[in-house]
Amino acid sequence: MKEDSQAAKAYNEIRRKILVNQLKPGLRLKEDVWSKTIGVSRVSIREALTRLMGENLVTQGEKGGFYVKVLTKDDVLEIRELREVLEIGAIRLSLKRLTSENIKMLEKICDDFTSMVKQGYFNGACDADMKFHEMLIKLSGNKKLFNAYFSSHIPLFHQKLNEAQETLNDYELTDKEHRAIVAALKAKNYKKAEDALIKHISRGESAILDL
Amino acid sequence: MKEDSQAAKAYNEIRRKILVNQLKPGLRLKEDVWSKTIGVSRVSIREALTRLMGENLVTQGEKGGFYVKVLTKDDVLEIRELREVLEIGAIRLSLKRLTSENIKMLEKICDDFTSMVKQGYFNGACDADMKFHEMLIKLSGNKKLFNAYFSSHIPLFHQKLNEAQETLNDYELTDKEHRAIVAALKAKNYKKAEDALIKHISRGESAILDL
DNA sequence: GTTTTAATTTTTGTATTCAAATTTTATTAA
DNA sequence: TTAATAAAATTTGAATACAAAAATTAAAAC
């Protein structure tokens, strides 16, 4: 799929919409509809949807037809575990190579989070939350790890998490937990960082499952 | 893609050939050739290749055209790290839920490995090696983790590993290391299991990079 | 003989087409 | 009215067709 092909155009557009939750899970994606919406032939739409199926962002019903991937309760549970595995792993990999620059980047994201919560920009705070965890992964310096992180529906997971954050207290807890992780990393205390991270992620899961 | 569609047929056939290294990395996959080989229309081949692109088993050149994914030296390094992350994580998740049944399954695989090496069935031993690590992942009980394991080109990595095993000594080392991991798991000693696993995987990487 | 250029062939990207399968709507019988 | 059946419409799976792009080959110029 060439960068500038019709199929790539469709792929990017549909993918984006799924990841920002504009296309609700379970929705059927009719080829003809999207063909007209995006203005490319049905073949190109099919190609885009097939690629998304390879990424597991869409599934196919037994009788054919594409559907937006549905996150079940089991999925949420498994994603939480996988997040734990990947983020803890990332910390372990990055600990040796962490620079003070890196720590500053994390602290900056924490500060952004704090200030946005204070000003009532809750969606912005959610962005910062996602960014924080992505940064943890990125600091591992391992592209494949980053890739695994993103192909695991973690963005979808985070979508749900966003909905779960309701009281101001939730945000303040998140903030504290993030900062605890950063502090442990700064002190190069692997065990402490790991514990803080596990605690943080587990709380997120509970919040989602309570929805 | 319906289970029994033409595209699924092509997808499975091409995918298998890539994973068992019958299609060498870097090879161009011409749609027309495969259309005639498999006996389906070019559209179905395109669909299969597009899906494989979503899985990152094939890539696309700047000027279009599909190619079998090439594993670079960096890839090997990153996969080794990712394996470490995923397998250590799997151990952590499974430790609480490990039954004596599970341990027996692992021991059985070790025994198979030993006996095949003794009889000179080195490819069989390689299979058992892969199976051992897959089992570690499976025992986590997390399908998404298993999925991440498989979408990380770890089978391709293992292919290379197979080529790297040369002397009888290599096989005996592998055997010992596997058994050390199982012993630690049996004793529910997480730290020991983790250490044994890291040591085992690191040695594998060195062997590959020496190729 | 080598390098450029032009012509030819191959290969891909995309649209169109068509039949089969599926879903929806309408009709009939209970 | 509800359930069952039949008819119509929609939707997909798959082949074909065709133009544009890329690669290869042949021809010409140096």
Image (cartoon, coloured by chain):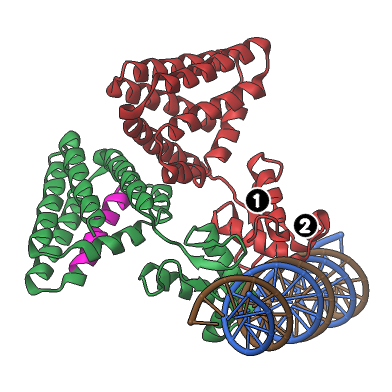
Chain colours: A green, B red, C blue, D brown
Residue A4: which numbered mark, if any?
Answer: none
Image mark 2: chain: B
Left or right, B171 with reference to A190: right
Q: Which of marks 2 and 1 is in front?
A: 2
- Give the SS element for disc 2: helix
Tell me which corner region of the image, top left, top right, bottom left or bottom right, holds residue B42.
Answer: bottom right
Q: Label 1: how many residues lie within 10 Å, few (<14), some (14-19) or many (20+)? A: some
Query: Percent position (x, y) of residue B132?
Result: 51, 26
Q: Label 2: how many residues lie within 10 Å, few (<14), some (14-19) or many (20+)? A: some
Query: Circle 1 is placed at which residue position?
Result: B26
Count the numbered circles shown.
2
Say above or below: B15 vs A11: above
Which residue appears at 14% of the width and 64% of the height? A113
Query: Circle 2 is placed at which residue position?
Result: B34
- Bounds of the magenta span? A125-139
Q: Is residue B33 magenta?
A: no
Q: Does the magenta stretch include residue A130?
A: yes
Separation of residues labelled 2 and 1 (CA atoms):
16 Å
Say above or below: A46 vs B88: below
